[in-house]
Amino acid sequence: MKRLQNSLYINTQGAYLHKERETLVIDINKEKAAQLPIHGIGAIFCFGNVMVSPQVMGFCGENSVNLAFFTEYGRFLARVQGKQTGNVLLRRAQYRKADEDPVSVARNIVAAKIQMQKQVLQRHQRNHGNSVEFSQQITAINHVLDTLKHCADLDKIRGYEGEAASRYFSVFNMLLTNKDLGFEFSGRVRRPPTDPVNCLLSFMYSVLGNDISAALQGVGLDPQVGFLHQERPGRDSLALDLLEEFRAFIADRLVLTLLNRQQLKPSDFITETGGAVKLKDDARKLVLKEYQSRKQQKIRHQFLDEDVEIGLLPHVQALLLARHIRGDLQQYPPFISK
């Protein structure tokens, strides 16, 4: 099993990351703020105006450290990738399956996504009592799941995913149990997010998606060739596929926790002239710290029947997908928590 390594998040604007022998050094205002050995670091995430020396880029490539760049909003920009590794035969098998037989993987992933969304609603019901709205949406989601079982059309699978998401987000505002600070959710708004809740959701999806992309590359799969998401230049379609399994379980639940516990306040967000909402630097640090803490927690993996750190789940699912593509597993077992 892969060891969960630390992720380094560089959030301070104007920071400079460079290399000294076998270590990474972060300078802020031309003063050394931190010095870390590269061993034990699995990924480096740079947000906004962070400068990275060419030597560090090569250093990361040599040591298989994922180096990625995001805007201050958390939107993914670029990633430094080292020498292509892995089994070319596995990638060829992935391409053939994506072209000729994408339905079973796509259907399993969408089923897992919908199941996890339902679990978020059911968890709320257990903690806060039943309501007509939740019961209606859970019943409708169950119907979507039943219909999805027999669907063999990729476009229809995508349609069922959209229908379930629409029902899930129609009651998402009710999951915000602490309204004292005025946070509201009226629907998904992405590019750019125009309210704090959408800002947090988009930020977490972006960071999590990059973790998944690195995990796919780690097992030798091509993150750009997916089964559910169509290919587009520069888009990691397979990473977006696997992200669907984790949106509700990791990202949505973390966002709800941060808001319901009032760990974030409206003053932690900035609304720019065009209406785009983004996190302030300190708030982004808090979110990433809580995400890192969440990654250390363990959960029982249903298929493996063993405890796995949440941060390793993308690596586990990437490995299971590779085994399915190789023909070692008849079906791809998506992640579903108990």
Image: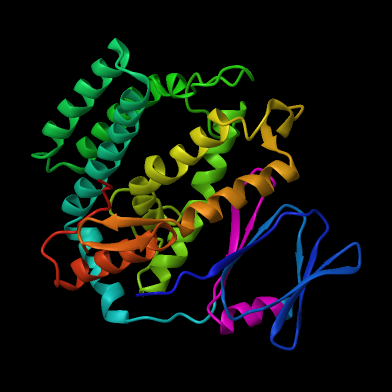
> Which residue is drawn at the image coordinates 20% and 46% (left, top)?
107
> Which residue is drawn at the image coordinates 28% and 27% (left, top)?
163
Q: Can you see residue 234?
A: no
Is the residue 83 above or below the residue 276 in the image?
below
Residue 121 point in image, percent of width and height: 33, 28
Is residue 286 in the magenta section?
no
Residue 278 lies in quadrant: top right
* 318 left or right of 10 in image: left
Is the residue 282 above or below the residue 64 in the image?
above
Residue found at the far right of this picture: 30
Is the residue 186 above or below the residue 122 in the image?
above
Residue found at the far top of this picture: 132
Residue 334 point in image, percent of width and height: 24, 53
Residue 336 point in image, percent of width and height: 26, 48
Q: In this picture, which residue range is highlighted in magenta?
A: 56-81
Is residue 79 in the magenta section?
yes
Residue found at the far bottom of this picture: 21
